[in-house]
Image (cartoon, rainbow, N blue to C red):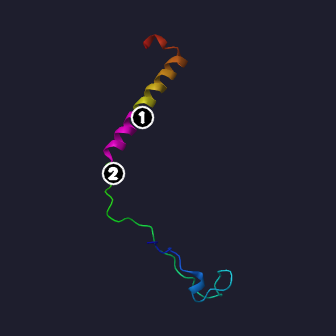
Amino acid sequence: MTATPPDPDPARTPGLEPGGGVAPGDTPPESGQTSGVSHHEPQPSRGRNIAALVVVLLLTALALGFVVAQVMGWSNLF
């Protein structure tokens, strides 16, 4: 069995001009709706996102500290 296409058949759709256009002021036919979710999608937890952000900020601060120490000549501290 073959599924019917989601768009209307132009040969059987009233109001279409040759080439598939519509007359000025006329409403074009609707296409089939295939988007949307079938059930409620749960929200992802924000705990992982916040933990990853904290880790990235700490690593950035540590790297910046090493750069500042090298520029200032404090290399004997590390």
Residue 29 image offset from top left, x and y in percent: 54, 82
Q: Is residue 23 magenta?
A: no
Residue 56 is labelled as 1
Residue 44 is labelled as 2
Q: Give the amino acid at mark 2.
A: Pro
| Most distant residue in the top direction | 76
The label nearer to you, 1 versus 2, is 2
Image quarter (top left, top right, bottom left or bottom right) of the N terminus: bottom left
| Span highlighted in magenta in the image | 46-56
Classed neighbour count for the residue bearing mark 1: other residues with Cα under 10 Å, few (<14), some (14–19), many (≥20): few
Classed neighbour count for the residue bearing mark 2: other residues with Cα under 10 Å, few (<14), some (14–19), many (≥20): few
Residue 66 image offset from top left, x and y in percent: 48, 21
- Eyeballing the image, is 50 above or below 3? above
| Most distant residue in the right direction | 18
Residue 11 is labelled as none
Compute the Cα span from label 1 to label 2: 20 Å
Which numbered disc, 1 or 2, marks the residue that appears first in the sequence?
2
Please, what is the dominant secondary structure of the magenta stretch? helix
Residue located at (33% from left, 42% from top): 48
Q: Nearer the viewer, residue 69 or 36?
A: 36
Residue located at (52% from left, 17% from top): 70
Residue 58 image offset from top left, x and y in percent: 40, 31
- Eyeballing the image, is 15 above or below 64? below
Residue located at (32% from left, 64% from top): 39
How many numbered marks have been drawn onto this rendered protein structure? 2
Q: Find residue 25 and report its image quarter.
A: bottom right
Residue 60 image offset from top left, x and y in percent: 45, 31
Q: Is residue 47 magenta?
A: yes
Q: Give the amino acid at mark 1.
A: Val
- Eyeballing the image, is 32 above or below 26? above
Residue located at (58% from left, 89% from top): 14
Q: Is residue 64 left or right of residue 58?
A: right
